[in-house]
Amino acid sequence: MSAYNRGGMAVPGNSEDDLSSAGQSAAPSPAVREIMVLQYLIQPVIASLEPMSASHATTLRQAFNRVEQHNPGFCCAFVENLLRRGDLDVNNDINFHETLLRLAYEEERQAPAAGPYNPAANPHLLQLEKRAKMLKEILSGIPQLIGDRKRFLEAIKDIANAIKEMLDTVSLVTASIGNAQRKQSLDQQKKDFIKYSKTFSNKLKTFFKDNSKTDVYISANQLIYQTNLILKAVRDY
């Protein structure tokens, strides 16, 4: 039988039937793809151009941030139209959700596991950053592992453990927050994270029945997005 941690993640055994669903499926946020395009594609490309002209790269970064803020989805449409100009069909020639995971994998591997605060003030914050980074690295590495059943099952177990460890640390951080409104906000982010981790578990169950990789990719992107929302909420404190 499968075991579930607090995040609702299935830890499968050797049979597809061991993957049990956990809770009702939650629909992915429509904003996830747009936000990840900006974070994991456009921003890293702009950063790579900084050696040529730091000031122009800064101007370009601010422009993309501003236009995305006022016109959500602009960056995603911009990239899709670039691809179409090259006679690439984003629906048939490219699995956009898989590509975003691969881009996130490269970015998360290079990103430092630290936030813009003094960890001495709250030792749990740095631990949360490290555990969030580990979870995002494993999730974004799914495209490289999903075709190898043995390695993918091991990755699923790693994801389950990473989710549990992250939730435990979020609870410690929440308990250390004195402001009631901020505590409530972080607690809501935690509930959303648990909801989407259950969705991810459900998509894994379906994958082992019909080999629907794209649904797994979409759900993994959603979970990375929710992880980033938790980090943002914590960093804002």
Image (spheres, rainbow, N blue to C red):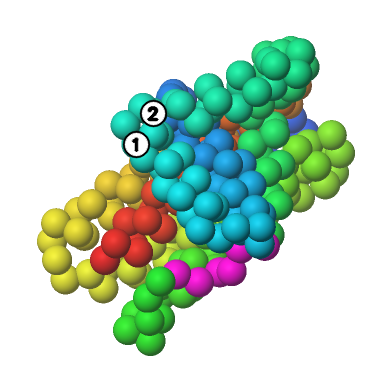
Q: Secondary structure at mark 2?
A: loop
**Which numbered disc covers residue 28?**
none
Q: Residue furthest left?
A: 180
* Residues at circles 2 and 1 in contact by the CB criterion of under 8 Å: yes
**Rendered-image quadrant of the N terminus:** top right
**Mark 2 neighbour density, 10 Å: few (under 14) some (14–19) many (20 or more):** some
- Residue 105, placed above or below residue 91: below
Percent position of residue 128, x then y: 46, 67
Percent position of residue 114, x then y: 50, 71
Q: Secondary structure at mark 1?
A: helix
Percent position of residue 99, x then y: 70, 34
Q: Nearer the viewer, residue 191 or 87?
A: 87
- Label the magenta part by its dominant secondary structure: loop
User: Alpha carbon of mark 2 to alpha carbon of mark 1: how far?
Assistant: 6 Å
| Residue shown at the point (54%, 52%) measured from the top left | 57
Q: Nearer the viewer, residue 39 or 98?
A: 39
- Residue 184, placed above or below residue 144: below
Residue named by callout 1? 69
Snapshot quadrant of residue 140: top right
Residues drawn in magenta = 110-115
